[in-house]
Image (tube, rainbow, N blue to C red):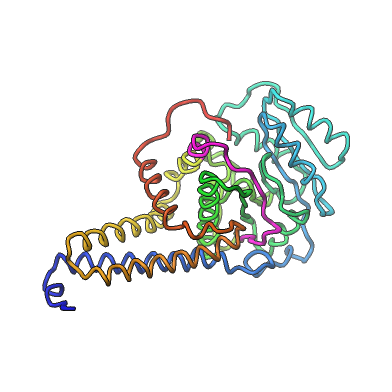
Amino acid sequence: MDFSNVLNNTYTLVLLSLLALSLIVLCLYYGLVWLRVARRGKGGGDGSSSGGANGKLPSVSVVIFAHNQADSLRKSLPYLLEQEYDDYEVVVVDYLSQDDTAYVLRVCTENYPNIKTYHFREDVNLFQGKKYPLSIGIKLASKEVILLTEPDCVPKSFDWIKQMVMNYGRGTEIVIGHTLLRGGKSLLNALQQYDNMTYNASFLASALMGMPYTATGRNLSYRRDFFFRCGGFIRHYPIRSGADDLFVNQNARKQNTTISVNNDAAVLYDAHPDFHHWHFDYSTRRSTYRYHSWRDRLARAVYPLAQILFIGSLVWLWVAGLFPWQILVAVLALRLIWEILCAFFLAKKFETKNICWFAPFFELYFLFLNTILTLVTLPKKKQRIR
């Protein structure tokens, strides 16, 4: 192959440079993010947990916000109330539910001494969303550590509480957990599993690298006194979403945050039944990103930008015939093999069988979806309380 024309063509050299740079960034991302999380040991968080500052596990309050979710509570509360942990309570805040939520909570209260409930009878929430009711639940909690989850989440094991809070060491104020999506065979379920897997890997790996920027309220813990010292949700009360995301983004630091990636510390939840509900929740989750720091926003933009540059430069070089197609195919194959290999280990960690083989296609789907959501704002319609 004669490369003399390539070396003398500035336009081609620029495209080749962009292709090489984007390939390096993508390969580093898959290795430093996906593979880093996938290779975490089965023993728990970041490998430095001590089970508390003095070796004693702290007392725990599991706090849940519920709104018309009686069916979910019927399934999840028995798992929460039967946890193998000595000193804990479950606090459920029922916000204006009109279904059987009150009945479900009354039955649980009659049978379990470690459940505490609070019922909102009228709408006194001056702000949208669940932050104010959730704050009431945290105030009612009487234990040292707050552990957040949601009504539709079921702990993967009866050691969930223990596996989460054993990561509290000296100076630790926040423990970030992860979620697993219940399996299914539909395309919609596969997309949601892939999204859950890569989203969790992104914020877990970021925390491991000392740059925690978000978490999921389905599985998140922090010390109760730390919550009040930070002012709770006061700084972002007017923002409907982000009770978990924005609190972590504003208060989590390298020195006070650790993670728990032991699958016994995970919680399971069901996929959305249709694309509309899933896309709505997906876009709602992304809607708070604009309130993140510039550093976090720039860091999060590197990966999609590298994807666009890789695809664009590769296609341009190929279609314009500026570079031998055999080498371009080899470059594409190298990227896909490394991506699928890293996705294989990550999918194994998140118990999502066979999903790794479709990783390149799913990445294209989410690249397109995220581009659209970046350009289009959320519709101004009544939203489900989150």
Q: Is residue 102 left or right of residue 220?
A: right
Asked whether residue 225 is drawn in magenta, I would say no
Residue beneath the point at 50% across and 36% down: 239
Q: Position of residue 162 (x, y in %)?
A: 76, 57
Q: Position of residue 261 (x, y in %)?
A: 63, 61
Asked whether residue 271 is drawn in magenta, I would say yes
Reply above or below: 41 against 377: below
**Can you tell which quarter of the image residue 164 is in?**
bottom right
Image mark count? 0
Quarter containing the C terminus: top right
Q: Is residue 250 visible?
A: no
Q: Is residue 144 visible?
A: yes
Q: Position of residue 325 (x, y in %)?
A: 24, 68
Residue beneath the point at 40% across and 65% down: 336
Quarter containing the N terminus: bottom left
Residue beneath the point at 29% across and 69% down: 20
The magenta-colored residue range is 259-281
Q: Is residue 195 left or right of residue 294?
A: right
Q: Residue 359 versus residue 119: which sits nearer the camera?
A: 359
Q: Is residue 277 left or right of residue 57?
A: left
Reply above or below: 99 against 386: above
**Can you tell which quarter of the image residue 91 is in?**
top right
Q: Position of residue 160 (x, y in %)?
A: 73, 54
Q: Residue 79 versus residue 297: which sits nearer the camera?
A: 79
